[in-house]
Image (cartoon, helix red, strand yellow):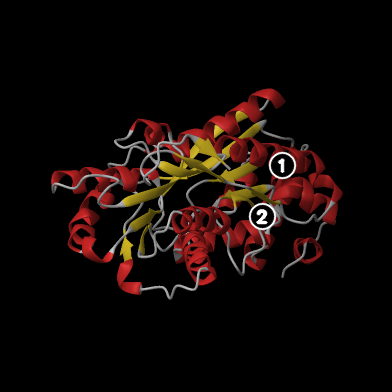
């Protein structure tokens, strides 16, 4: 990796001069500035984004980077609205600004440039996935040691901060509840595979079945993408399998509500024909028909905690390399009528 010293030697100036030129600090002869920039370009030298930020000052903004998905109203989804509300609460308390940015999930997003251009002092990434393009941008941010974290997504080989819920435990509790009510033929409608929480929910589902001595039946695994539409579309296949199902665990409330609509349209009576437990505990869950038994995820608290952690890192960034943020919050089960009970309880 090229060093500042090598740039200084090639340009015939001191390291301090290289720093002043690249950070835009203080007066400088045009000929000197040009010589340093040419040397840096020739050697492929780039500033450390964090060091640059401290040399030039801070923007006062925390960045939130979200995926741009055409025709999808992200702000109306419970997941994103709750996370953003929590982030906004922490930012307001700390007197910071909030800069909302959108990325194309199919392209590599340049997180590092956000810091180099002083647009943000820290960043929180929402809706990240394991798509190669997404991982490439996050890998670059991790390599720079930037004060940022990824919400509710973890990567086995990228050392970057995360704030998430324990989705293995949440799914385990959901399926264990169904098992406790005597159901044995339990299917699973999961979300998109590029999200780590989909794999975590599948792990929790299988763990509960294995603990009960039930061999998982992969023919009872159904695929969705966390949307109402995908849940509604899954109704056709699930309806055809009703004679093989006692109950169904669904990876989020939106899919579950779409599924229930599709099943009712086909003449099903719920929960008599099929018990359902969902995930998220969105506002819509308590008003669905029947009201959803669901796993409550503290999205607001997760967003607030992530913002607090990143803002703390911004203040501590000058102290050198630190361990990445790593916080995992506990979900809880909220029991309503969709799994065949009228009891309102949570545990």
* Residue at (69% x, 62% y) in the render: 39
Picture layout, residue 43 above or below residue 60: below
- Find out whether the residues at labels 1 and 2 contact each other: C-beta distance under 8 Å: no
In the drawing, does residue 260 fall left or right of residue 52?
A: left
**For mark 2, does the 10 Å Cα neighbourhood hold few (<14), some (14 to 19), or many (20 or more) residues?**
some
Instruction: Where is residue 324? Give x, y as percent.
Output: 72, 55
Secondary structure state at the residue bearing disc 2: helix
Q: CA distance from mark 1 to mark 2?
A: 35 Å
- Asked if residue 119 shows in the view, the reply is no
Instruction: Where is residue 274? Give x, y as percent.
Output: 29, 52
In the drawing, does residue 156 fall left or right of residue 18?
A: left
Circle 2 is placed at which residue position? Answer: 37
Instruction: Where is residue 31? Give x, y as percent.
Output: 70, 49
Secondary structure state at the residue bearing disc 1: helix
Circle 1 is placed at which residue position? Answer: 309
In the drawing, does residue 208 fall left or right of residue 273?
A: right
In the drawing, does residue 266 fall left or right of residue 313?
A: left
Residue at the outermost left position: 266
User: Which corner quadrant of the image does residue 347 belong to?
Assistant: top right
Picture layout, residue 242 above or below residue 315: below
Of labels 1 and 2, earlier in sequence is: 2
Frontmost residue, 213 versus 92: 213
């Amino acid at each position: 990796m090229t060093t500042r010293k090598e740039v200084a030697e090639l340009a015939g100036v001191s390291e301090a001069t290289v720093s002043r030129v690249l950070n835009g600090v203080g007066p400088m002869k045009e000929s000197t500035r040009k010589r340093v920039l040419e040397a840096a370009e020739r050697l492929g030298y780039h500033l450390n984004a964090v060091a640059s930020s401290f040399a030039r000052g801070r923007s006062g903004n925390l960045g939130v980077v979200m995926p741009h998905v055409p025709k999808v109203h992200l702000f109306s989804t419970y997941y994103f609205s709750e996370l953003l509300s929590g982030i906004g609460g922490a930012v307001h308390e700390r007197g910071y600004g909030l800069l909302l940015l959108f990325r194309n999930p199919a392209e590599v997003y340049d997180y590092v440039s956000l810091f180099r251009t002083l647009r943000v002092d820290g960043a929180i990434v929402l809706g990240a996935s394991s798509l190669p393009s997404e991982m490439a941008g996050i890998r670059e941010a991790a390599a720079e040691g930037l004060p940022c974290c990824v919400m509710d997504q973890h990567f086995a080989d990228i050392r970057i901060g995360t704030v998430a819920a324990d989705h293995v435990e949440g799914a385990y509790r959901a399926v264990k509840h169904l098992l406790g009510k005597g159901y044995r033929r339990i299917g699973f409608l999961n979300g998109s595979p590029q999200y780590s929480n989909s794999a975590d929910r599948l792990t929790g589902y299988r763990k509960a079945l294995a603990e009960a001595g039930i061999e998982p039946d992969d023919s009872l695994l159904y695929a969705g993408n966390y949307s109402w539409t995908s849940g509604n579309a899954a109704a056709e296949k699930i309806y055809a399998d009703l004679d093989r199902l006692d109950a169904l665990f669904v990876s989020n409330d939106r899919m579950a509500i779409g599924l229930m609509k599709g099943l009712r349209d086909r003449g099903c009576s719920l929960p008599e024909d099929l018990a359902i437990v969902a995930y998220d505990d969105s506002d819509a869950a308590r008003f669905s028909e029947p009201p959803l038994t669901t796993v409550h995820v503290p999205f607001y608290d997760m967003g607030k905690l992530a913002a607090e952690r990143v803002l703390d890192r911004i203040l501590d960034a000058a102290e050198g390399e630190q361990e990445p943020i790593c916080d995992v919050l506990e979900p809880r089960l909220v029991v309503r009528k969709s799994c065949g009970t009228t009891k309102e309880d949570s545990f």
